Image (cartoon, grey):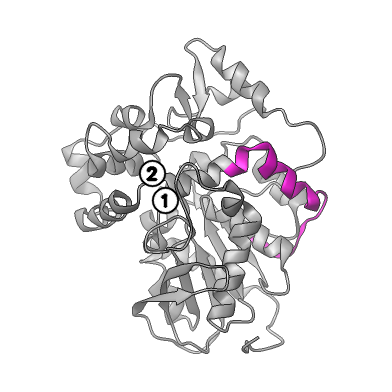
């Protein structure tokens, strides 16, 4: 077990060689073995607030940035007309490497990513296993690099539109020019929109009872909740409004209190959502897929595991992804942990159980043969 470290979190702004000035939350001693935590959408480094002190208390230096296009991190044009290459996986991996370089961290014991941060963590480990000694993916399984077969994304969107009622995949909707305004200027107000969005994907929403989908077909995907496969012509603000918590459910939500919600609403009210939406736009574009085919057939060679809430539909939203992670995407698979009662926001909903799962994963890694030093 590493030596005990400081639990309190600190905020700093770090100038990086990738051109970003990144807002970073950190905890633990500067010389301790490091962990890099990568948030998803619509979150911030703040989403790790309850987990970080627990990891630091176990002797780790914990580093959690606001990623490109989010929160207090600046230096990237994040509008709808921005160059989307800057929001692709290679750029996001470069951002992680640049941050570690600026902090004089040569390597980390693990990179841990949640939601869209999960594939970024996986790609960090796949591309630079010398820097990222292990990877933990949370809520979004990593099925491996895209292969060379023809892209059929347009086929599924056509098939979804042909359903009765017509449906639309949320990532396809996220690419719309009006997606940012729909959420930022939601009729119910930004705080109420975020409250509903967090609620309906959490373990608190009664509709979250995930099961394995048969295949990547419109008929199978139609079983997903409306926040994943939306009704065509209905935006996200209206979609989640129909699943919003009532007053009693809101009062009972201990994992997202009013101060937490106000923090998110304040940050996204200031920056908008477009920076995060650009990640999706690049990921589903032909150019975004093509640049990752360079790695077709490669696996994550370092130890890799998976953590999610047992009531998280994110685990099953891509049929076969978790099975591919277990069997082909990872050379050193360390297993999956599904946390009872938690939904998509597992590190916020169940921070104690999440921290314990992370620490179990770390404890089972091969002994560290070197200590971290400045590059």
Relative depth, front residue between 256 and 25? 25
Q: Give the quarter of the figure containing the N terminus.
A: bottom right
Q: Which image quarter: residue 23?
A: bottom left
Q: Is residue 123 magenta?
A: no
With 101 as the anchor, is 170 left or right in this view? Answer: left
Residue 307 placement (x, y as % from top left): 54, 55
Helix, strand or loop under label 1: loop
Q: Residue at x 41, y 67 (%)?
A: 51
Is any atom of residue 63 visible in this view? yes
Q: How many marks?
A: 2
With 277 as the anchor, is 121 left or right in this view? Answer: right
Q: Which residue is mark 2?
A: 202
Relative depth, front residue between 353 and 136? 136
With 206 as the anchor, is 35 left or right in this view? Answer: right
Q: Which residue is mark 1?
A: 345
Question: Relative to 128, does residue 92 appear above or below in the rendering?
Answer: above
Question: Relative to 225, does residue 336 appear above or below in the rendering?
Answer: below
Residue 339 placement (x, y as % from top left): 48, 53
Marks 1 and 2, how far apart at CA = 6 Å
Mark 2 surroundings: few (<14), some (14-19) or many (≥20) residues within 10 A = many
Q: Residue at x 60, y 33 (%)?
A: 212
């Amino acid at each position: 077990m590493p030596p005990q470290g400081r639990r309190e979190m600190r905020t700093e702004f770090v100038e990086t060689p990738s051109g970003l000035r990144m807002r970073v939350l950190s905890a633990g001693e500067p010389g301790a073995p490091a962990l890099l935590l990568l948030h998803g959408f619509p979150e911030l480094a703040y989403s790790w607030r309850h987990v970080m002190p627990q990891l630091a208390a176990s002797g780790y230096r914990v580093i959690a940035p606001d990623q490109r296009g989010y929160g207090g991190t600046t230096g990237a044009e994040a509008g709808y007309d921005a160059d989307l290459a800057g929001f692709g996986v290679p750029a996001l991996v470069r951002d992680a490497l640049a941050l570690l370089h600026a902090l004089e961290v040569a390597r980390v014991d693990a990179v841990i990513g949640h939601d869209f941060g999960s594939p970024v963590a996986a790609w960090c480990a796949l591309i630079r296993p010398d820097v990222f000694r292990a990877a933990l993916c949370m809520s979004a399984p990593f099925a491996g690099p895209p292969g060379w077969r023809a892209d059929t994304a347009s086929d599924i969107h056509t098939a979804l539109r042909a359903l009765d009622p017509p449906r639309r995949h949320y990532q396809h909707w996220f690419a719309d020019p009006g997606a940012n305004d729909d959420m930022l200027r939601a009729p119910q107000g930004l705080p109420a929109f975020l409250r509903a969005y967090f609620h309906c994907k959490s373990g608190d929403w009664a509709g979250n009872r995930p099961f394995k989908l048969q295949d990547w077909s419109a008929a199978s995907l139609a079983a997903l909740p409306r926040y994943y496969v939306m009704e065509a012509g209905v935006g996200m603000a209206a979609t989640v409004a129909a699943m919003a918590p009532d007053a009693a459910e809101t009062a009972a939500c201990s994992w997202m209190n009013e101060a937490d919600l106000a923090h998110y609403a304040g940050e996204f009210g200031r920056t908008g959502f477009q920076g995060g939406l650009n990640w999706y736009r690049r990921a589903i574009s032909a150019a975004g897929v093509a640049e990752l085919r360079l790695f077709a057939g490669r696996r994550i060679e370092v130890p890799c595991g998976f953590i999610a809430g047992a009531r998280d539909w994110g685990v099953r939203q891509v049929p076969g992804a978790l099975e591919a992670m277990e069997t082909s995407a990872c050379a050193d698979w360390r297993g999956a942990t599904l946390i009872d009662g938690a939904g998509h926001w597992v590190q916020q909903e169940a921070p104690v159980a999440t921290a314990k799962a992370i620490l179990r994963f770390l404890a089972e890694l091969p002994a560290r043969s070197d200590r971290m030093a400045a590059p």
